[in-house]
Image: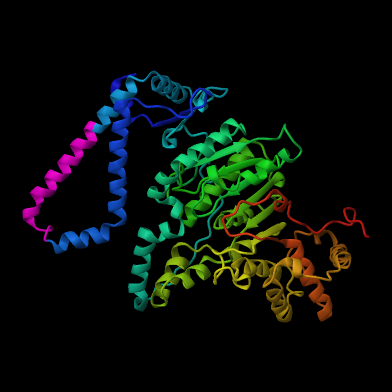
Amino acid sequence: MPFHKYIFTPRLLKEYDGSRDNYEPGTLEKYGDQLLTALNLMWSFSYYTSPILVSILYRRGYFVAESVGAFAKVTTGIGLLVAVSLCMRGLGRSMNMVYVRFAETLENARRNSDRTGDPKAALRRYDFDFHQWPIDYTVKSGSSKPTAQRNKNFWISSLPCQIAAYVAIHTFGIRMIYPGSVRLLQSYVEPMLIEGRTKLVTQCNGQRNKVKTTDGNEIDTIIVDNRHKSANGKTLVICSEGNASFYEIGIMSTPLDLKYSVMGWNHPGFAGSSGRPYPDQDQNAIDAVLQFAIRELGFKPENIILYGWSIGGYSTLYAASQYPDVKGVILDATFDDVLHLALPRMPERISNIVKIAIRDYVNLNNTELIARYNGPVLFIRRTEDEIICAEDSVLSTNRGNFLLIGMLKQRFPNIFKPEQEVLAKELLSKPVDFIKNVPDDQCVSLLMSYLSENGNNGTSRSYPMEIGSEYTSEQRNSMVKFLIKKHLSDFKSSHCTPLPEEFFQTPWEIPSETDYVFT
């Protein structure tokens, strides 16, 4: 391979041959990489602090014609340092036989990508910068689900706020909502990501794949296929991570311990995924992941559980709204609307800017999405959650409560009258174990009777149900208690505690008469 190609080939992180923990670069490659990494971190730091830096430089009089020479010298010096670092890195790689073998394997995989079989089999022995991994699946143009666009009202009087909202979201705002997309944070957690990815590949036989979306982003995914290893393996769990989490160190561990087939993916801009985690890009990403699982891996929608943690609940519910036949949805520590979390944490004087920024650019409204999905849902609530509560660890302010009530109101409007909504909020202000005297058999019997009397369309996935219009207040109250207990599971923990196996269950669905045995 020509020397110049080693300059731009990807950074090698690990070789999965069992003989070494990590790839050991030579001296030249090591110091060349360290210089480039330092320069990249300096650039990232300068980018995030650019308003402050520009202000300081302006006050010191650097934005004048006489300063052009000084800027040119600094720019030239940095350019020479980059060139020297690249040459050092390329020379060191060309002298390292481990890297030479890797570079040849990568070139062969690219050259033979259109051949039958798995031309990437040899390449999967290596872990390297994912941006140069060959694409495994591309979503066909026009096959992606249409994204609902929000109509933006424009008023001259609010123009300053609209400009401020646009600038805020497209600079620091999206990074505050999704801190996992910040390169400085990714550099800090990289050793943990490598370690977690190694465990998934070597211990769980995970296979990493790159999926290309309709908007051109390349999404980093991993699949652990247990279909031939256990009964649970026939079900695929697709995991959507939180705003500062990655599949390498995220929620995959719980379904993996239960021997499900599990697929993880990283949001756009996270680790190996390109792009930025704006809602439209995130929607296209999860849609591409579903298409890959169904069309390429061969999983049927009815054998797929969508599992979302925290802000990953938005990705999960969007996918559920587009693929309504999935087996079920599990929402762990998820909120109803990100606006209700943003406003209490921002100064009141900029509340109008926050509202415009959220509604126009990052409208993560799970209440709207869950109304479009009629399948079974399990809510997992952290009773000591400090993140999605409007008041720290105050259970009655947990925004998951409002998402659950919103869903049940939409599905059972005649049961959730104003009086029952007040009751539901009161019940949810305490752990679900405090809900007593729930007549399960009676409530299930009422539901099945309603389905039976409403003919072929009276299935448990036909909502809203008109059941309850003739019920007494006491009967409605019993149904409220029953429905909350069936859809909610409480876990005594903080927001980021790993979920124990016993809390990961298939979401409840109204049984048919043949499935239910009266006691």
Vertical position of residue 191 compared to residue 10: above or below: below
Residue 15 among magenta residues: no
Q: Can residue 138 be seen in this view?
A: no
- Residue 348 falls in which quadrant of the image? bottom left
Vertical position of residue 310 compared to residue 260: above or below: below
Vertical position of residue 199 compared to residue 240: above or below: above
Majority secondary structure of magenta residues = helix
Q: In which quarter of the image is the N terminus?
A: top left
Q: Picture coordinates of residue 185 (x, y %)? A: 41, 49
Q: Picture coordinates of residue 254 (x, y %)? A: 65, 46
Residue drawn at x 38%, y 48% is 183
Residue drawn at x 45%, y 29% is 22
Q: Picture coordinates of residue 445 (x, y %)? A: 88, 65
- Residue 100 falls in which quadrant of the image? top left
Residue 72 among magenta residues: yes
Range of magenta residues: 61-84
Q: In which quarter of the image is the C terminus?
A: bottom right
Observer-nearest of 360 and 480: 480
Q: Picture coordinates of residue 489 (x, y %)? A: 71, 60
Q: In this view, does 308 lie to the left or right of 409?
A: left
Q: Which residue lies furthest to the left in this view?
A: 66
Q: Can residue 256 be seen in this view?
A: yes
